[in-house]
Amino acid sequence: QVQLVESGGGLVQAGDSLRLSCAASGRTFSSYAMAWFRQAPGKEREFVTRINSNGGRTYYADSVKGRFTISRDNAKNTVYLQVHSLKPEDTAVYYCAADLFGYFSDPSSIRYWGQGTQVTVSS
């Protein structure tokens, strides 16, 4: 069982940066691959980025490549999403997710989700 709690969202201006955090409970955090998704109003939840269990491999959606960076600290049971050069189209609720096998292709099949943190980017 994994419980996830996101934090770090807020209202920012275009071009600003934020660091989102996702704190996980449980002693098996280091066994899980982690991912960030986001959901804008009226849109489906979309994949943003993922990281494998030891932090050695990452993957990004094209829309955020070069602006977002995912990282993790297994000693702190936390995964981070550093976001730079924010755009109004980045406005969304950002969710972290956990999966033992790193299968994040189908959001409906992911068992562990956080409650989300709102990021609003004004132009």
Image (tube, grey):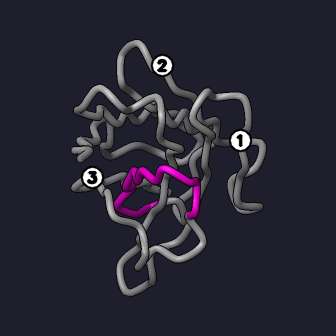
- x and y, in percent, of residue 49 in the image: 61, 52
The residue pinned by badge 1 equals 58
Q: Which residue is more in the foreground, 15 or 7?
A: 7
The secondary structure type at the circle numbered 3 is loop
- x and y, in percent, of residue 123 in the image: 50, 57
Q: In this view, does 120 lie above or below 26?
A: below
Label 3 – label 1 distance at C-alpha: 20 Å
Residue type, label 1:
Thr
Q: Which residue is more in the foreground, 65 or 26?
A: 26
Label 2 – label 3 distance at C-alpha: 17 Å
Q: Is residue 120 left or right of residue 117?
A: right
Label number found at residue 114:
3
Quick check: marks 2 and 1 in contact, CB under 8 Å?
no
The secondary structure type at the circle numbered 1 is strand
Residue type, label 3:
Gly
Q: Is residue 62 above or below residue 50?
A: below
Label number found at residue 67:
none
Q: In which quarter of the image is residue 104?
A: bottom right
Residue beneath the point at 73% across and 49% down: 59
Label 2 – label 1 distance at C-alpha: 14 Å
- Bounds of the magenta span? 91-103
Badge 1: how crowded within 10 Å, few (<14), some, or many (20+)? some
Residue beneath the point at 64% across and 41% down: 68
Q: Is residue 93 above or below residue 42?
A: above
**30 falls in the magenta region:** no
Q: Which residue is more in the foreground, 9 or 107?
A: 107
- x and y, in percent, of residue 21 in the image: 37, 33
The residue pinned by badge 2 equals 73
